[in-house]
Image (tube, grey):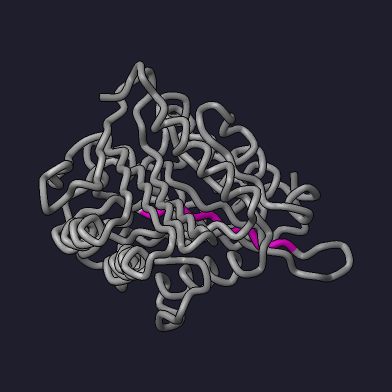
């Protein structure tokens, strides 16, 4: 897998794609003598977790292991605290959350010194938890890459979290609580500008919940400008679609099927050069203001098409969608 990642990025759509490649990458990194460090954010882990076991093994093998562990994940507080303490006792650098914020982002960074003395950073960015049990029950989307742009962004993110630097401008990453709302609202407004100029426009978003007023107001304004907007919202939706003079160009569906729909995908037409983001964040006040979240832009045209196809087939669903 490490050799493949040096050639191309890999998009995984769970559970249709197994989580095993991610787990095996982490397990092999724990044993690999060339791996220097592993950094990971954890929101929920399985009981008897392979993730925790790999991190413990890495620490035992003398690697630097940093774990940002959210101990306030609802219903998992006891398990998370126990696992975090095990890691800390084994020599891992454990951060028990960030101030008053809840850490919900899903990021993994593996730093490896290659045989030619180059340092390569392997990253995994996801909408799903590092939990092999729920990975079989939730639909999630994630990216494996050695792309230096992603590696730089994720590395900077961990530097900020551990207090080693102040936030910088990320190339492909949007984070909260810093500026996610402003950037997403800006992307919606750009589609409205294109529509008013007579250019092609469109927005398709899949997330768990839609509740943030500023984001909803931006969608209403874009609809009034003529932007076609399609939303796939599993749970709470505070936007009213199809209202004359307000949201005539907005359609909302919800999919309730065999799996819990947990992916977050944001698509903006961008006048024919699509911007596609995936990650951990819903459009909610808590996601924008009270959580550490991340969305990241897909660079590869092939991976953008793969993510767009997930949206396309969701919109065609005539069995589980209402």
Place of residue 176 in the rendered image (x, y in percent of width and height, measured from the top left): 31, 66
Is residue 84 at all visible to an observer of this figure?
no
257 or 227, nearer to the observer: 227
Q: Is residue 107 above or below residue 160?
A: above
Magenta span of residues: 105-112
Q: Is residue 252 above or below residue 303?
A: above
Place of residue 220 in the rendered image (x, y in percent of width and height, measured from the top left): 18, 57
Horizontal relation, residue 124 to residue 201: left or right? right
Place of residue 83 in the rendered image (x, y in percent of width and height, measured from the top left): 39, 43
Task: Count every numbered label the image shows and give the total.
Answer: 0
Is residue 49 at all visible to an observer of this figure?
yes
2 or 302, nearer to the observer: 302
Residue drawn at point x = 27 percent, y = 31 percent: 254
Residue drawn at point x = 63 percent, y = 54 percent: 301
Q: Check residue 111 for magenta coloring.
A: yes
Horizontal relation, residue 278 to residue 197: left or right? right
Taking the view exactly as shown, the residue that stands out farthest to the right is 116
104 or 10, nearer to the observer: 10
21 or 229, nearer to the observer: 229
Q: Check residue 208 for magenta coloring.
A: no
């Amino acid at each position: 897998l490490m050799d493949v990642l040096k050639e191309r990025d890999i998009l995984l759509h769970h559970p249709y794609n197994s989580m095993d490649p991610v787990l095996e990458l982490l397990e092999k990194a724990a044993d690999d003598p060339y791996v220097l460090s592993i950094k990971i954010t954890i929101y929920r882990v399985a009981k008897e977790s392979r993730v925790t076991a790999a991190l413990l093994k890495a620490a035992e093998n003398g690697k630097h292991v940093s774990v940002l562990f959210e101990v306030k994940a609802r219903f998992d507080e006891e398990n998370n605290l126990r696992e975090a303490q095990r890691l800390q006792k084994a020599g891992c650098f454990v951060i028990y959350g960030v101030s008053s914020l809840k850490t919900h982002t899903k990021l993994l960074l593996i730093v490896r010194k290659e045989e030619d003395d180059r340092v390569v950073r392997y990253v995994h960015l996801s909408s799903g938890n590092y939990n092999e049990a729920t990975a079989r029950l939730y639909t999630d989307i994630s990216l494996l890459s050695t792309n230096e742009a992603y590696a730089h962004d994720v590395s900077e993110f961990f530097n900020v979290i551990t207090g080693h630097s102040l936030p910088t401008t990320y190339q492909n990453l949007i984070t909260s609580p810093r500026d996610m709302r402003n950037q997403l609202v800006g992307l919606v407004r750009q589609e409205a500008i294109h529509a008013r100029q007579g250019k092609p426009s469109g927005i398709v978003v899949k997330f768990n919940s839609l509740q943030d007023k500023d984001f909803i107001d931006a969608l209403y304004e874009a609809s009034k400008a003529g932007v076609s907007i399609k939303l796939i919202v599993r749970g709470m939706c505070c936007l009213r679609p199809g209202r004359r003079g307000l949201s005539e160009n907005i359609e909302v569906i919800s999919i309730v099927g065999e799996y819990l729909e947990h992916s977050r995908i944001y698509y903006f037409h961008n006048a024919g050069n699509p911007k596609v983001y995936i990650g951990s964040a819903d459009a909610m006040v808590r996601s924008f203001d009270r959580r550490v979240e991340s969305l990241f832009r897909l660079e590869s045209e092939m991976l953008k098409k793969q993510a767009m196809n997930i949206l396309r087939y969701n919109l065609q669903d005539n069995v589980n969608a209402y």
